[in-house]
Amino acid sequence: MHEMAIVQSMLDIALRAGEDAGAKRIRTVRVKMGEYSDVVPVIMREYFAVAAKGTICEGAEIEIARIPVTMRCRACGWEGRVDRRRIVCGGCGGIALTLLTGREFFVESLEAE
Ligand SMILES: [Zn+2]
């Protein structure tokens, strides 16, 4: 059900932006998504197709760009990319890490007609 709420807000953003621009149809919705985000793209696309029926977003393609996971070490101050399967500091090997990027999910841009 998590995806449903996300899709609804994606659709709201796309519809509002499309109306403001006087678009007849939205062809592509480009979203940015962190690698650590728990959104499942397949489910998201399915929900979107259903939710967008009868709107200017009907049939729109969803393009997903990934944002890598980066963290900061609270022990040594190291910052960098972290493998989500092995979350340790690249400097000291510690595990007291704060997430900097990787959980994002937002609409980046739209392609309209
Ligand atoms: Zn460290």
Image (tube, helix red, strand yellow):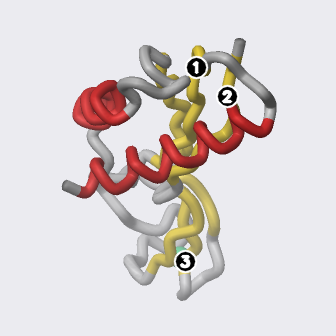
Q: Residue at x 50, y 55 (%)?
A: 102
- Of the residues under marks 2 and 1, which one precedes in the sequence? 1
Residue 1, x across and y down, in percent: 19, 55
Please tell me how crowded label 2 is: few (under 14), some (14-19), or many (20+) other residues with Cα within 10 Å. many
Q: Amino acid at mark 1?
A: Thr
Query: Which numbered mark, 3 or 1, is in the foreground of this view?
Result: 1
- Of the residues under marks 3 and 1, which one precedes in the sequence? 1
State if disc 2 and disc 3 touch (CB < 8 Å): no
Q: Residue at x 60, y 58 (%)?
A: 80
Image disc number at residue 73? 3
- Of the residues under marks 3 and 2, which one precedes in the sequence? 3
For marks 3 and 1, give the CA distance: 38 Å
Label 3 within 8 A of ligand 1 by Cβ: yes
Q: Amino acid at mark 2?
A: Leu
Residue to which mark 2 is pinned: 110
Residue to which mark 1 is pinned: 28
Query: Which numbered mark, 3 or 2, is in the foreground of this view?
Result: 2
